[in-house]
Amino acid sequence: MQTQTYNQMWQDCLDRLRLSITEEEFVKWFKPISPIGFDGVELRLRVPNESFISSIEKRYMRYLVPIIAELYGADTKLCYAIPRRAQQPSVATDTIAVPRFTQPTDTANIKNPFVIPGIRRMIIDPQLNPNYTFENHIEGECNRLARSAGMAVAVSPGNNAFNPLYIYGDSGLGKTHVVQAIGHEVRQRHPELQVLYVSMNKFQAQFQTAYKNGEITDFIHFYQTIDVLIIDDIQELTGKTGTQNAFFNIFNHLQLAGKQLILTSDKPPVELKDIEQRLLTRFKWGLSAYLSVPDYQTKVKIIRAKAQRLGAHIPEDVVTYLAENISANVREIEGALSSLIANASFLGRKITISLAKDILKVYVKLTQREITIDHIVKVVCDYFNIELDTFNSAKRTRDVAQARQVAMYLSKQHTKAPLTVIGSSIGGRNHATVLHSCKAVADMIDTDKQFKMQIEEIERIVLGKN
């Protein structure tokens, strides 16, 4: 290839690069570089000194790699040469294989930067859903702690008291939305940081592939390069000893390096089973934030926001009907509303309560109202004729203690709240006390017919069957 040709190609490369960096950076670091050859495989560049190599690798490879891949080919190798000094021969100081620049859709195929000599930073798809941002997340009492902590993490990732940030709650309550919103916020505020979201099932699949190929060290090293690591459904680590060991090494390295970890689970750390104690201890180091079911006002806001995004007008009486009758699962609320709007459009009908009843009765169960711990406590207090203040006090007389046990038992049976939440809501007890109370009530049901009849009667009231 003639000099004129590869000089022009390099100029094209610089013209594109100039659009991504400041003029000052361009003049300082790229004006002094000149191409000295390209044979179809290796592009050789003359740089003034080694500091240029270090700076390019550290700051500009994320811009340079895709440009070179497009202009010269994805298999191009980039070689640096330093001019002769004091009779020293010209030496090639580094070789960089330009990776194929395709946006990955599967993190199992992300190349490990440790096996590509010279590249210290890679362009990694963070695997974030563009719709899961704080801008379209509905805040309410059910998620305020997790959201506020997430914003604090995004402002100063790794340098805060919430590391790891552990968000837990039942399926469909928006854990994934919150943690991905944190990822988006970090990328906006700190574009230089590597952010990666991955489910634990995907992490496990990657681990198994690395194990079969003898690449466990590379697998661990790859994750140790991430600045903000978001792991969804950490409870899937249960019983996977090898994966737990790898994740322990990754967790420790990131913590010590001041990187940020964000985890989600359907249970608090104390209720996870078959996970090594050293990991459970580390999960408790930061902040555990619980996502509860949305209250009425939050459901109303969710319905209105979803309708606006879909470009549909929902009358206020229909909004009220949906908020009062759809079970409090964010995913179910949004899915039911989408179904209602779609059916109204296909049938050419106005959205009314009548249509909502007709359409949604086959989509979600509308008849059963949400059962909460507060509702159960009220029913139990009324049944045993105990004042709510007395129930919540430190008083430990037999009748009050038994009422608390019954409330804990029914809360475990009829809500999806974790044991820790049940305990904290009923007298500020821990999960062990809740387990003991549930066992005590179950034993009494088996041995005392009158007590069993009382519990059945209270359950009917709780379920609204009386």
Image (cartoon, rainbow, N blue to C red):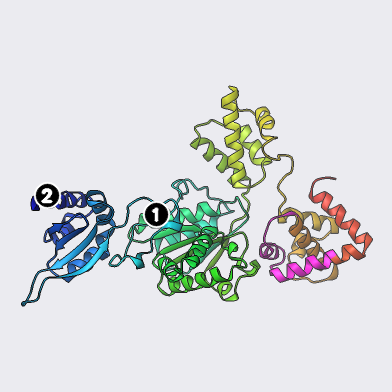
Image-based side of 386 in relation to 34, left or right: right
Element assignment for label 1: loop
| x 89%, y 59%: residue | 452
Q: Earlier in the sequence, mark 1 or mark 2?
A: 2
Mark 1 vs mark 2, foreground winner is: 2
Image-based side of 220 in relation to 418, left or right: left
CA separation in Å, label 1 and label 2: 33 Å
Mark 1: which amino acid?
Asp
- Dot 2: few (<14), some (14–19), or many (≥20) neighbours within 10 Å? few
Q: Is residue 350 above or below residue 335?
A: above
Element assignment for label 2: helix
Q: Is residue 162 visible?
A: no
Q: Residue 319, image x and y in percent?
A: 61, 36
Mark 2: which amino acid?
Thr
Look at the image and say whether residue 333 sits in the magenta stretch: no
Q: Is residue 148 above or below residue 51?
A: above
Q: Residue 162, image x and y in percent?
A: 49, 67
Q: Residue 19, image x and y in percent?
A: 21, 49
Residue holding disc 1: 125
User: Which span is picked out in magenta?
Assistant: 414-442
For this rendering, which residue is in front, 48 or 6? 6
Residue holding disc 2: 5
- Dot 1: few (<14), some (14–19), or many (≥20) neighbours within 10 Å? some
Q: Is residue 141 visible?
A: yes
- Total labels: the figure holds 2
For the stretch drawn in magenta, the main secondary structure is helix
For this rendering, which residue is in front, 257 or 240? 240
Look at the image and say whether residue 419 sits in the magenta stretch: yes
Most distant residue in the right direction: 449
